[in-house]
């Protein structure tokens, strides 16, 4: 951020914006807002990570050592909520803010003031979530999916969580409206839809998914709120409602949500792989169609989260086959990335390492996803550590690794400085090692029957849990190295060359100086 | 563009709520989760006099000051035979309370084979202070019940209904 700030006056533009803290409060610049999104999400990532450390510390040995069961439940619940809504989603919106305008040749986001507002809602929601730990009765403790009846019975912490989800939803919806409008209306002349960079395409589709399902989430938490305080019985069986209906409505949001968190990751990886393979992306149009099919399919598979909730066999079959169908477009993507690398003139800088690590581990997560989709197996592994292992493979080594890859890839463009390549590689290899140490053994724990969200466990699970906890501590510490690398880069990194990645072909590398000026593309670029 | 997207957002918010009646209609049409309406017995029902099934009756209340018990704790019948059982509720408090009984079965798949013609659980029950009421349940356990099941449990739990809220739907 300091580098961006230092750059402001270098371009002879008459900026009259305030300085100091008010600059950040009142800014409407997409780059400032993008940076704030990224810092916010990293802060939430550290908080969510702290909760994860607490969970793993408690699970280091059988028995209750550190966290009482009530507090442990709050830790698991808030870890999930903070990581999903506070870390991963805002981080991708941060990337969209920085990258979408400079990748399509637009001067800024379409609705600059709304952009400011959608960011500044986030700290409020984050404070509500974190602050709920100090409310009487503690934070919400019924799991991040807040199923009733636990969520209708909890204390004021649940109300704080509901408000936080409302605010985060509003922020996401405004962010998506902004992104859709920017992409559809503000592309440089000559940039047709099918010439857009993949990252922009994936975000366009993600933004549509967001406006499709975030309002439904807002609806379901509103029902929860009225059930809690205004005497309605949406989810109360005694009043004629149905708790299972909550799960149906929640997962109508929840399943597209997991693709909201992974599609932009696909986009980032689709930018990085061609750059470091020095070849155009293989099968560009099939990538676009695959992204769109994943988004459409994601809306009709929600009940695979609820195979054990009670469902006719025909329903189970439908959701099982529909879920397995998603593996087809996802496979198209993986093969396209592989084909892009095939006979490319590859080099392995940190962004590329994270991108390849992403493909490798995401495929493992995808495979366990197909396994979980099979009804008879899912009934066995439902709510066990197998599921935990599965979704951490797609969310940590999927979404999070792509965020790291994107940060290393674009930080020279953002700040005009290079990160420390040696430390970057260390960050990658340590993350890779500790990530697998943490989560691979959880597959075995799950298959052996260890349930999730329980602070204590049978002695037979002790060894794998200790291994997993050691991996988690290592993974957590490794992320402090990332923070150090980034601060080191921003504060005193080596000056970046105009085009640090010779294989990059998108507009921000070919048409903008490094670092990107505070105001870019005031005149749209000319595209051949 | 923004207006279109905002309207779309609003539509999706309403859609979230529209899922509630849609879900109920879906369950009604497909016959899933039918708690509040009498069943119809299949025309080809027959009594399997070779087999005996023991039915245990259970009654609970949840959060309301009622006494609730079956007048007999168990019964032994042939599958396919109709049986009627009386339950008794007493309101021990000095206020009028309305309650709704929700059934629960063991084994879980018993609901596929248990056909209920009459039940106090189909409607809400309103009891004046200190009132006592006897209510019947009449049902058949179909001969399709797997042969290895010899004992089943039928349980009811009464929940208090909020006065303001409308009663159990349908």
Image (cartoon, coloured by chain):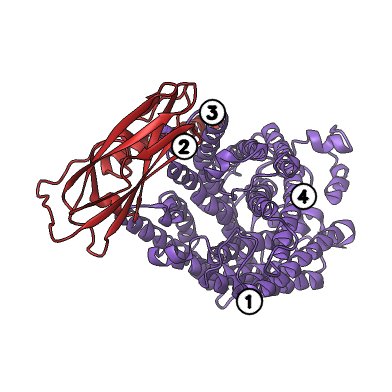
Chain colours: A purple, B red
How far apart in space, not on screen, are marks 3 and 2 (Cα)? 36 Å
Residue tagged 2: A236
* Residue A39 tag number: 4
Q: Is residue A356 above or below residue A512?
A: below
Classify residue A394 by image quadrant: bottom right
Q: Contact (CB < 8 A) between labels 3 and 4? A: no
Q: Residues within 10 Å of mark 3 (few under 14, many from 20)?
A: few
Q: Is any part of residue A459 visible from this angle?
A: yes
Which residue occupies 86% across, 49% down?
Answer: A2
Disc 3 + disc 2, Cβ < 8 Å: no
The chain holding disc 3 is: B
Q: Earlier in the sequence, mark 2 or mark 1?
A: 2
Distance from Cα at disc 2 to Cα at disc 4: 41 Å
> In the image shown, does A292 or A124 lie closer to the viewer?
A124
Instruction: State left or right for residue A195 relative to residue A475.
Output: left
Report which quarter residue A493 is drawn in: bottom right
Circle 2 packing at 10 Å, graded few (<14), some (14-19), many (20+), is many
Residue receiving disc 3? B3
Gap in angstroms between the C-alphas marked 2 and 1: 61 Å
Place of residue A428 in the rendered image (x, y in percent of width and height, measured from the top left)? 72, 70
In front: label 2 or label 1: 2
Query: Which residue was labeled with disc 1?
Result: A345
The image shows residue A297 at horizontal and vertical percentages of 42, 53
Depth check, mark 1 against mark 4: the one in front is 4
């Amino acid at each position: 951020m300091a580098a961006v700030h230092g750059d402001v006056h270098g371009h002879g533009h008459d900026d009259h914006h305030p300085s100091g803290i008010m600059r950040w409060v009142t800014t409407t610049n997409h780059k400032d807002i993008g940076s704030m999104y990224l810092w916010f999400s990293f802060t939430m990532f550290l908080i969510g990570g702290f909760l994860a450390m607490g969970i793993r510390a408690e699970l280091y040995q059988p028995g209750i050592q550190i966290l009482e069961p009530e507090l442990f439940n709050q830790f698991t619940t808030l870890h999930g909520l903070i990581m999903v809504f506070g870390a991963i989603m805002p981080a991708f919106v941060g990337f969209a803010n920085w990258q979408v305008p400079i990748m399509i040749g637009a001067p800024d986001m379409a609705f600059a003031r709304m952009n400011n507002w959608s960011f500044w809602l986030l700290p409020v929601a984050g404070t509500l979530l974190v602050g709920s730990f100090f409310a009487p009765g503690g934070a919400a403790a019924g799991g991040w999916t807040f199923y009733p009846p636990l969520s209708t019975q909890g204390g004021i912490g649940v109300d704080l969580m509901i408000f936080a989800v409302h605010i985060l939803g509003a922020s996401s919806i405004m962010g998506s409206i902004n992104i859709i409008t920017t992409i559809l209306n503000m592309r440089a002349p000559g940039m047709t839809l099918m010439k857009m960079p993949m990252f922009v395409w994936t975000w366009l589709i993600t933004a549509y998914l967001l406006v499709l399902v975030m309002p439904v989430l807002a609806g379901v938490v509103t029902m929860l709120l009225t059930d809690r305080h205004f005497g309605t019985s949406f989810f109360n069986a005694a009043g004629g409602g149905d708790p299972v209906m909550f799960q149906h409505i929640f997962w109508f949001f929840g399943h597209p949500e997991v693709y909201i968190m992974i599609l932009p990751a696909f986009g980032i990886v689709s930018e990085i792989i061609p750059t470091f393979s020095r070849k155009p992306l293989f099968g560009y149009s099939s990538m676009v169609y695959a992204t769109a099919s994943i988004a459409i399919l994601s809306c009709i598979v929600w009940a695979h989260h609820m195979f054990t909730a009670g469902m006719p066999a025909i329903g189970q079959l439908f959701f099982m086959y529909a879920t397995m169908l998603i593996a087809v477009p996802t496979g198209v993507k993986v093969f396209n990335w592989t084909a892009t690398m095939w006979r490319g003139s590859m080099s392995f800088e940190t962004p590329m390492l994270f991108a390849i690590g992403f493909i490798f581990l995401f495929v493992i997560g995808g495979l366990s996803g197909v396994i979980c989709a099979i009804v008879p197996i899912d009934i066995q592994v439902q709510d066990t550590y197998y599921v935990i292992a599965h979704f951490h493979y797609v969310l940590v080594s999927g979404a999070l690794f792509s965020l790291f890859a994107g940060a290393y890839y674009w930080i020279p463009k953002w700040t005009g400085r290079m990160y420390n390549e040696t430390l970057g590689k260390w960050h990658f290899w340590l993350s890779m090692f500790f990530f697998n140490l943490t989560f691979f053994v959880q597959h075995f724990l799950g298959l052996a029957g260890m349930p999730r969200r329980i602070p204590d466990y049978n002695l037979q699970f002790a060894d794998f849990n200790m291994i997993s906890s050691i991996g988690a501590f290592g993974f957590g510490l490794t992320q402090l190295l990332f923070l150090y690398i980034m601060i080191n880069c921003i504060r005193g990194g080596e000056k970046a060359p105009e085009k640090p990645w010779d294989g990059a072909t998108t507009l921000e590398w070919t048409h903008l100086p490094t670092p990107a000026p505070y105001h870019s593309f005031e005149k749209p670029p000319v595209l051949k | 563009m923004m207006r279109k997207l905002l309207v779309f957002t609003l539509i999706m918010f309403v859609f979230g709520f529209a899922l509630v009646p849609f879900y109920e209609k879906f369950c009604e049409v497909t016959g899933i989760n039918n708690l509040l309406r009498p069943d119809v017995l299949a025309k080809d029902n027959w009594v399997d006099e070779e087999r005996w099934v023991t039915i245990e009756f259970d009654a609970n209340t949840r959060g309301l000051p009622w006494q609730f018990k079956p007048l007999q704790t168990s019964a032994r019948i042939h599958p396919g035979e109709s049986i009627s059982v009386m339950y008794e509720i007493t309101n021990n408090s000095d206020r009028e309370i309305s309650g709704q009984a929700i059934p629960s079965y063991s084994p879980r798949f018993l609901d596929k084979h248990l056909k209920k013609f009459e039940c106090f659980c189909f409607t809400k029950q309103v009891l004046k202070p200190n009132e006592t009421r006897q209510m019947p349940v009449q049902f058949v356990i179909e001969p399709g019940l797997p042969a290895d099941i010899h004992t089943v449990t039928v349980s009811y739990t009464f929940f208090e209904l909020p006065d303001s809220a409308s009663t159990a739907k349908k």
